Image (cartoon, rainbow, N blue to C red):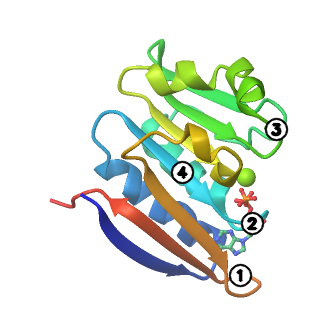
């Protein structure tokens, strides 16, 4: 654990694929925190993860809902959080964020983690996505899971 891993992608599909592979390596509960601008590819990466974690769902941005919960066989398997419009901890509390963090074996994915530094659990996996060009992205994962 705690391995840093970097990727360069040239299109959205490549970013999704990296998200997909990453998700196959997660075991049990995890929190994945994204850092990066609008249009970096945070949702694209999460969509890739969703193909593995909740293959029956179409993952879309929780821009308005703030949290999208995905279930498999009645159990919440992934919570996708968009903290862009969160202003303070009371605001965050009212969204049900802390319930997501407590769900057993649930993967919580957070976009705009920059906005809620006080709420990021210890041991979270951090992912930064930088725009290097129109379609080029640098994805850095801090805490890439073991590949065996
Ligand atoms: P975010 O959630 O970070 O705001 P999205 O995943 O919603 O970003 O959108 C990323 C946008 O950038 C999409 O329009 C996508 O087609 C485009 N794009 C271009 N190149 C890439 C790439 N290499 N990886 C991810 N998205 C890319
Ligand atoms: Mg997004």
- Report the residue marked by disc 4: 33
Mark 3 CB lies closer than 8 A to ligand 2? no
User: How far across and how far down the image is residue 74, in percent?
Assistant: 48, 12
First-in-chain label (1 vs 2): 2
Pointer 1 local density, CA inside 10 Å: few below 14, some 14–19, many at least 20: few
Q: Residue at x 84, y 34 (%)?
A: 64
- Label 1's element? loop
Q: Do the residues labelled 3 and 1 touch (CB within 8 Å)?
A: no
Q: Do the residues labelled 2 and 3 touch (CB within 8 Å)?
A: no
**Whole-Å distance between the Cαs marked 4 and 1?**
22 Å
- Report the residue marked by disc 2: 37
Q: Are marks 1 and 2 in contact (CB under 8 Å)?
A: no
First-in-chain label (3 vs 1): 3
Q: Residue at x 59, y 49 (%)?
A: 47
Mark 1 CB lies closer than 8 A to ligand 1? yes
Is the residue 136 above or below the residue 145 in the image? below
Q: Nearer the viewer, mark 3 or mark 1?
A: 3
């Amino acid at each position: 654990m705690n391995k840093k891993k970097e990727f360069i992608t040239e299109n959205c599909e490549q970013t999704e694929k990296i998200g997909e592979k990453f998700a196959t390596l997660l075991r049990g509960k995890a929190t994945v925190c994204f850092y990066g601008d609008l249009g970096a590819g945070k949702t694209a990466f999460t969509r890739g993860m969703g193909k593995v974690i909740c293959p029956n769902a179409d993952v879309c941005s929780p821009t308005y809902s703030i949290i999208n919960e995905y279930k498999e066989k009645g159990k919440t398997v992934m919570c996708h959080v968009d903290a862009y419009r969160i202003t303070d901890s009371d605001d965050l509390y009212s969204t049900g964020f802390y319930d997501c963090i407590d769900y057993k074996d649930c993967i919580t994915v957070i976009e705009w983690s920059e906005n809620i530094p006080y709420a990021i659990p210890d041991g979270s996996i951090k992912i930064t996505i930088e725009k290097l060009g129109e379609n080029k992205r640098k994805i850095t994962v801090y805490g890439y899971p073991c590949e065996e």
